[in-house]
Every structure is written in C-alpha cells, then in structure tokens.
Amino acid sequence: MSKLYKITLNGTLIGTSELEKADAPMGVAFGLIEFNGIVSPYEFLREYCLNNQIELASDYPEDKMISTMSIPELKITSNNGIEIKGIGNQITGIDNEEYEISIFGIPYPFYEEEFPHHVKEYENMFNKE
C-alpha cells in the first residue's frame, strides 16, 4: 500500500523514503530515509552542505548528528516521476541510528491527491466517538 519515493541530489539517487508521517494541515510529509550506498550520511551531508554554502541547523561531529536547512538540489519524486515540491526540505539524523527527510509547505490540492491517507488520518482524529 505504501509508496516509495526516490531522493536524488544533483540527479544522483541517494536514497528512498515512504514519507510515512505527516502534518496534513501544514502540508508536511516526512519519513525515514533508506540511504543508497552512503556509508556515513553525516559525512556525506556535511561535506555537501559546506561545499554548496547550505546552512546547517545543527552539527554535532562528535555524535555524527546533523540537521540541514533546505537543500535546493534535493529532489523527492514518486514512483511515477512526479516531484513532491514544497517551500523547503530538511534532513535530520545521526549515523548508527536513523535519518529523516521532511518536505514543508506542499500545496493543496496536490497534497491531498498525493497523500490522501495522511489527510484521511488527520480527518479521522476528529471523527472519533
């Protein structure tokens, strides 16, 4: 049932995510990242951000923990090639644990079309007896 989204950076596939979590009213979708052949996502992301003048929200080298600000060349696409565009994105995580990608400000009605399950889940929170 769940879709798998491709995460590319400068056209190179770096991983996938199911974007299994959401804040539907805010147009946010997020989920765990399954990296593709990247041994240390911390080192990879830190180097990319430093080389491309992308601000880091947080950086803890001793723990290999990082949180990026929005990365313009980061693209998230559905399995049918549709790009999930919002006003920004962020990757947060720690090596040896997990990383999460967030896409903020995905516009409606696209959000509802792409993530009907998230919208339904949100609406159901208010319909409980």
Image (cartoon, rainbow, N blue to C red):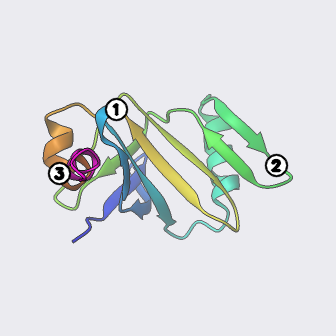
Quadrant location, the N terminus: bottom left
Dot label at residue 116: 3
Dot label at residue 26: 1
Q: How many numbered marks have been drawn onto this rendered protein structure?
A: 3
Callout 2 amino acid: Pro
In the image, is residue 79 above or below residue 88? below
In the image, is residue 23 above or below residue 30? above
- Per the rendered image, the range of residues in magenta is 120-129
Front position in the image: 99 or 119: 119
Quadrant of residue 46 within the rendered picture: top right
Residue at the spot x=48%, y=60% of the render?
32
Earlier sequence position, callout 1 versus callout 2: 1
Q: Looking at this view, name the residue that lies furthest to the front.
A: 129
Residue 109 place in picture, x, y as percent: 13, 34
Dot label at residue 61: 2
Q: Seen in the image, is 36 located left or right of residue 115?
A: right
